[in-house]
Image: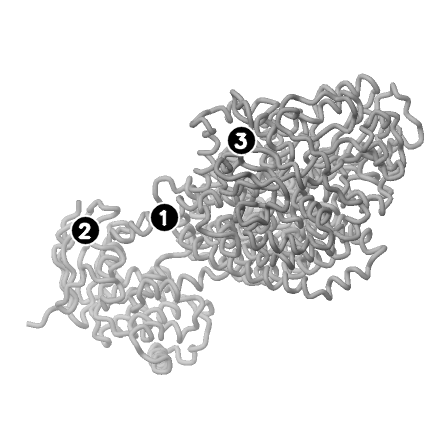
Amino acid sequence: MTPSRLDLQALALGYEGRAFMRGIDLRVDASEIVAILGPSGSGKSTLLSAIAGVVPPLDGRILIDGRDVTRAPIHERDVGLIFQEPLLFPHLDVASNIAYGLRRHGQTRKAALLRATELLEWLGLGGYERRRVDELSGGQAQRVALARALAPRPAVLCLDEPFSALDADLRQRLAVEVSAMLRESGVAAIHVTHDPTEARTVADRVIELSALGEAL
Amino acid sequence: MRRRTSPVITANIAVLASALLLAGCASSGTDGSDAVEPAASEPQTVQLLAHDSFVVSDDLITALKEDTGITLEIISGSDAGTMVAGAVLAAGNPTGDVMFGVDNTLLSRALEADVFEPYESPELTSVVPALRTDTAEGRVTPIDFGDVCINIHDASFTDIDAPSTLDDLIDPTYRDMLVVEDPGTSSPGLAFLLATIARYGDGWTDYWAALRDNGVKVAASWTDAYFGEFSGGGEGTRPIVVSYATSPPAEIVYAEEPKPEAPSSSVMADGCYRQVEYAGVLAGARNPEGARVVIDWLLSEGVQSDVPMSMFVFPAREGIALPAVFTDFVPTIDSPLQLPPDDVAAGIAGWLAEWGAVMGR
Amino acid sequence: MTPTLPGWLRWSWLPPGAFLLVFLVYPLAVLAVTVTSDSGGGVISTLASPTLWQVTGLAAGQAAASTVVALLVGLPLANVVSRYRFRGRAFAQALVTVPFVLPTVVVALALRSLLGDGVPQGLVLVVMAHAYVNLAVVARIVGAQWAQHSGDYESVARTLGASRWRAFVDVTLPSLRPAIAASAAVVFVFSFTSLGIVLLLGDPTTRTLESQILRQTSVLLDFPGAAATALVQLVIVSTVLLLGAAASRRSATRRSRPPALRPLPSSVSGRAAVRITAVIGALIVLAPVAALVASSLRSSRGWALSWWTSLGSVDAGTTRLSPPSEAITTSLTYAALTALIAAGVGGLAAIASLTSGRSRIIAVLALIPLGVSAATLGLGTLLAFGRPPMDLRATGLLIPLAHALVAVPLVIAVVAPSLRSTDTRMSAVAATLGARPTRAFWTTYGPVLRIVMVAAAALAGAVSLGEFGAATFLGRAAAPTVPVQIVRLLGRPGEQSLGVAAVLAVVLVVMTLLLVMLVDRWATPLRRTTAQENPA
């Protein structure tokens, strides 16, 4: 049996050394989108931070494609991260933002920019390559952020309330759009939200955070 | 429309207004004295410009007020050079009534700019004969004198003899032992340079080249040389420094209680440069009458007796009893070196440049 | 500019403009007229002399090196002190400011006694001293921006494959660039115009134009030469400051998140890195201070309190009129007056910079005092306000006014960014609720102003506490400030002189620490206020 793309085993999470949740077990397969539901402040973001490597877990193991990355540095994990805000690098233009991860993965500047152009076409943002990022609308910026995260083809993508800063109409539209793109890309996605409707729109599986492990 | 003024603006206007108001008061207070000659008994103020080393005891200022009605306002802060620079720029419309502390290295520049108006103090007759005529045609009055001399940290010269002449300092025996001050930034440093010029004439550059080859260290300031480099003053390692003839007694006066019986360093009597400090009535003074009274006061027995322990210099007046630390620990400097003020004024820029060239600075 | 700003705001540049005109332009004009009236030719010949340009080149190189070192040491400190929550952070932040206000002669002696002969006098020592003194400039200015920078950008970059260092270079540095440019400009200017450190720790290669000016004025009495040198210095410094201002203008536009201190990194190595940086920073700052404390407690007979107890004795001072302790009162009085004047003038200039167009220029013009030679301004002020028809010396205001000239640029640097980053929509909201423009202005900016003005005033006070140059030109014999008293004590022999000077230096450090900690206490509510105003 091939290993899951993402495999969390008996993970314990905490803040400043104190655990608030332990025994988290979760497997996500390629092209699968799992939504994790929970009220704000329940620790959803900490879970994503642990997967991405921003904060180390207090206990347990994180496997990506069967490889133990629990102690691996962020940039060697193959995990993408999307926040509520797009966090596009303000000093780079749209295409350079998307190309950034490709450059870090050894692509030439020319190849990376070419790929960025393709991704922008795919997002329906053709012609935006040289735009400054602060000229983009909220929805456009979040789409560029998604393209930037997917460009280096990560194994796992963590989405932390990616649409909550957008208005309801756009949120719904983008949710449908994004879930289609994620499936197409083959990434294993964890989508964290407090909105049950959004969770059902996007995900193949919806799990309450409290069902993942034991809250302390 | 109801307008509210910013408290910041209000405060700001208040500050500016009060500054200007106070300025008006201050100037009108001194302006009047030009028109009406003040009687000695009338309350009046005299502004004394002095360099930052000027110190006088409080009771003498009180006595001046009681005897003459003069309130002395001492204005000081900068070094002598900057003070004289300010006086030269303000010549004719001075920033005070009387100036103390112009010395024989700076005197010519002040005289050239007509900073002073003539005054011959009746107290001049009690000044030591050597200084009595040293008045630049009656424009300034000598008040005190002191010597810039080589100081020697005695503890370092138990095995070898301490140097006793300027010539000794270029002897390899004393290699890497001497620290001097940069004449371009330090008053004793300049005095020492002038001493070597007075001694060696045109050969002074050779002497400095020899000093350089013998490992002389050049510090930027007296503080740096004395406390930083001199082994007798602080943490330093060099046992020979350019300082004042009165530094050893000052070491005792400013030591911790109980005071030591003898200082740890002594003075080399050869190669000392004599600095005389003068006072003068500033041309265009608001209160020239009061200024003359203050010059007499500076030469009075009271102030002259105070001068040694306040400023660590020798009084210009004859017959003033010196404190014991002076008589015990300052050698008699029989033939101090000196250059005529005019020569100094004419030569100084060139000498400093030449010195810089010799010393690689 | 939002349409709801009150009309009087257009005139808020007037008081600071008048202040600069009266206390900066007028004295310099008086001096210029006095000097050039009889010898204009001297100015030209000095400008043509190769020495002037040789010194300019050397000083620029020295200042550039000092700036680079100050940035290299200051950036890690800014990171640790302004971003992370740990015990003693407030103290550490205050501590960084101490070198900035210590008199240069004290810094020089402390560095010399610490480093001994290990680092000979010259360029290296001068650069180290400049970096030490200007740490606060980098740590404060860059720290303020770093605190507002969200660490999530780096996380994103790292998930995209950037190493920690790469993420710093690619993401953090660009977003800090305006603050780095601004602080670099200030450090460069301070190092380029440095006097005391250059004289005390330097050698011929470290001369500055300022040291040339002092020699030309006080030793050679070559006023045209000094004027020419001062002119060159003013032009160079103004250019650098304008470049810095242009670079930092692009900051303050984006406020991604309200500044909030974060916990220490959770990884062991991350924690260790923060702690080690904090400890090394504290050691760098504290070592000279510790040396001072030690010399204030030590005499030739061992450890003793005698220097401290002699603080109240008339004989221990240099005036013989008042005890050294009186210098503390003098300094505190001047600091309070300076705070008042500088906060008023600088605050209004910052407010003026909110409006469009010409009135914004005043905030740039107010930077000029940083580039005017202290000797030049001192002599100019003496001629302008030291004799009839306008003798300000007796008012005791001359020194606070001179200190305020130096402090106003820093006040503007503190106040203007806070005002510019305040959410202007608030005043629109207030206006729709019926507030007239002035009321709407105070509703919007009042809370911020109240807080930053106190911070800025205290900073101005700290500048006044440590200032030495103006106080020597304009001082009065009976009332020396603490730095002046220290320098005078160090100008006479005897271990008491050294001991009492060390005591006063320690007092100066403590006063500064208290003042700066006060600033930080007042600035803390600002973080909370903005957090409420701009929920993330």
* Residue that appears at 73% across and 66% down: C48
Position in image of residue A105 (x %, y %): 29, 74
How many neighbours does mark 1 have within 10 angstroms: few (below 14), some (14-19), or many (20 or more)? some
Q: Nearer the viewer, mark 3 or mark 2?
A: 3
Evaluate whether residue C72 shows in this view: yes
Q: Is residue C404 left or right of residue C520?
A: right
A38 up-or-down from C47: above or below: above
Query: Could you tell me how far apart the alpha carbons at marks 3 and 1 are, in whole angstroms?
Result: 53 Å
**Closer to the camera, A166 or C142?**
C142
Q: Which residue is mark 1?
A: C84
Give the structural element (helix, strand or loop) at label 2. Answer: loop
Query: Could you tell me how far apart the alpha carbons at marks 3 and 2 are, in whole angstroms?
Result: 67 Å
Q: Amino acid at mark 2?
A: Leu
State which chain disc 2 sits on. A
Locate residue B273: give its quadrant: top right
* Residue that appears at 44% across and 47% down: C115
